[in-house]
Image (cartoon, coloured by chain):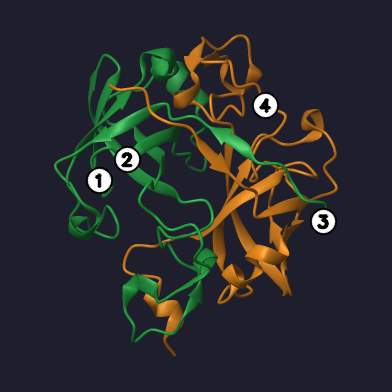
Chain colours: A orange, B green
Amino acid sequence: MSEPDAFRLEPIGVVRSVLRDRAAAPRQGEEGAPDAWIEVAPRAARGLSGIRVGDELLVITWLHEARRDVLKVHPRSDERLPLAGVFATRSPDRPNPLGLHRVIVHKVAGRRLRVGPLEAIDGTPVVDIKPVLRCGRKETRRETP
Amino acid sequence: MSEPDAFRLEPIGVVRSVLRDRAAAPRQGEEGAPDAWIEVAPRAARGLSGIRVGDELLVITWLHEARRDVLKVHPRSDERLPLAGVFATRSPDRPNPLGLHRVIVHKVAGRRLRVGPLEAIDGTPVVDIKPVLRCGRKETRRETP
């Protein structure tokens, strides 16, 4: 394989949460994470058009406190579990520390979305937002009466 | 919001596919996409440890042919549908053109994974691989007999 280039990822927003540090954060949203705000940057705000209360979204974050030089971890930081490759786990420590969070939209307030549950800590950069696709319910359905 | 930094995303692998150009690619994997190889770079190969045939994975790609200056699109490129914000659609054109692909592992051959269905075209950089999490079936289960 020829050596690939690198790419410049530019945050489109930021997480505003009561979670302040990584040690306090649940491992997954479903494990007791709170609701949080996603504050989208003015330059990207038009991209939110069409998002409505009740939508299910996938939020992709940059886990800025993660280590990028780790390729094997004990799953869930449990040292009784054998080491596994980071691509077989959801460890935040990985070569590109992208976080993937499935959330429900509770409020839409201009360029801010109230969503949950979200285990990312306050200040975590948001790099993308996508709708959850369901079988037999394509995104076009959202756009038609 | 203070202006956030940008981040350097480094490919961990590449898609090897019979799909050669974007016009020929299905919009979603479930819409008739073929199987493909994911070829992981030697420096990241240890991160694959624990991935097995039959696993469901989320592959995150960098859609290198996408436009980054687009914030509104016609969903599914259908001009009869009203414009929607890119974050309410799965358009590849978006500020950070990350692709998210849910696939099944069909073969594990060293640092190559045969997976499908995958609608990404040949040469698409892969930036992360994560296991699909299911309710009540945590990743720890994968690691114990």
Is any atom of residue B79 visible in this view? yes
Q: Amino acid at mark 3?
A: Met
Q: Is residue A122 left or right of residue B11?
A: right
* Residue A119 percent location from the top left of the image: 70, 43
Quadrant location of residue A5?
Answer: top left
Left or right side of B52 for A57: right
Inter-mark Cα distance, 2 to 3: 33 Å
Instruction: Look at label 4 and name its amino acid.
Output: Ala
Judging from the image, mark 1 belongs to the subunit labelled: B
Q: Are marks 2 and 1 on the same chain?
A: yes
Residue that carries the numbered disc 1 in the rendered image: B121
- Marks 1 and 3 sit apart, C-alpha to C-alpha, by 36 Å
- Quadrant containing the N terminus of chain A is top left
Q: Chain of mark 2?
A: B
Q: Which residue is mark 3?
A: B1
Tell me where residue A9 sits by quadrant: top right
**Label 1: element kind:** loop
* Neighbourhood count class around disc 3 (C-alpha, 10 Å): few under 14, some 14–19, many 20 upward: few
Helix, strand or loop at mark 4: loop
Please report contact status of discs 2 and 1: CB closer than 8 Å, yes or no.
Answer: yes
Amino acid marked by disc 1:
Ile
Examine the image and state in which quarter residue B42 appears.
top left
Circle 3 chain: B
